Image (tube, rainbow, N blue to C red):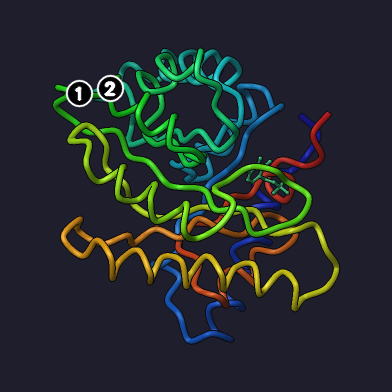
Amino acid sequence: MDYDIKAGLSRIEERLAAACLRSGRKREEIRLMAVSKFHPLPAVEEAFKQGIRLFGENRVQEGTEKFAAFRETRRSGGDGRDGVEVHLVGSLQRNKAKKAAAFFDCIQSVDRDSLIDELGALTAGREKPLMILLELHTGEESKAGFPDTDSLYRGGEKAVSYPGLKPLGLMTMAPFSKDEKTIRSSFRRLREARDGLEKRFPLSGGWPCLSMGMSGDFELAVEEGSTLVRIGTAIFGERG
Ligand SMILES: *Cc1c(COP(=O)(O)O)cnc(C)c1O
């Protein structure tokens, strides 16, 4: 591990602080997730040491293996988790849904009705509901996500009907673009979709989470209302 995670994190904190200042927001309104995909356990340990408690992985197999090992190393502290949360942020295939529902604290990449049904059935009778975010497709390059707000709202209605699921908000990936306007409009669409969901399903306790912003665009995301930024490269360096 030759990359300086501590320095990476302090640069991000500076940039977050500046974005908050520009947009009149408070730093506490925004959670910082370290996306550790393709980075080994020692990198996770180092980020934890620097205060990170929220991690993201994009593959079920890699995430469960790495974080099962991570939790194992932390058994001494209380429930063995030390307040660590691990979210799945990559697309979830049906045949991995059971494993994912059992392991992850939140699945951010819920992108179709059939997956909501699957997760709803898997979590029936659970004491602690599974947190989920619905993913909206707002960019051109990635194919993931509900394709439009109508299908998203139908997904929202379905999601709130399962007692084992706790929908908390929305997630998106902006297009990989240099054009600030294009990126902003993607984030804005997510925020407007969230507002639409809150109007339609006001009894569900709100949809507070807007998971948007990555290494290349998180400042714009914060300015557009993000409550959770998912940062990989800017914390851990390039993926090998
Ligand atoms: C990889 C990934 C990230 C982090 O991307 P960086 O550009 O490395 O910060 C965020 N969100 C999702 C869904 C990802 O797959």
Residue drawn at 39 percent across, 58 percent down: 209
Foreground pick, 45 / 18: 18
Foreground pick, 80 / 95: 95
Q: Is residue 152 above or below residue 68?
A: below
Mark 1: which secondary structure?
Answer: loop
Q: Which residue is mark 2?
A: 121
On the rendered structure, is 5 left or right of 28? right
Mark 2: which secondary structure?
Answer: helix
Query: In terms of image quadrants, where is residue 240?
Result: top right
Whole-percent x, y for residue 226 in the image: 50, 66
Q: Is mark 1 within 8 Å of ligand 1?
A: no
Whole-percent x, y for residue 85 in the image: 40, 36
Q: Is residue 62 above or below residue 113?
A: above
Labels 2 & 1 near each other (Cβ < 8 A): yes
Q: Which residue is mark 1?
A: 124
Query: In terms of image quadrants, where is residue 56?
Result: top right
CA gap between label 2 and label 1 equals: 5 Å
Q: Amino acid at mark 1?
A: Ala
Foreground pick, 108 / 51: 108
Foreground pick, 18 / 148: 148
Residue drawn at 38 percent across, 50 percent down: 154
Whole-percent x, y for residue 164 in the image: 22, 31
Q: Quadrant of the N terminus?
A: top right
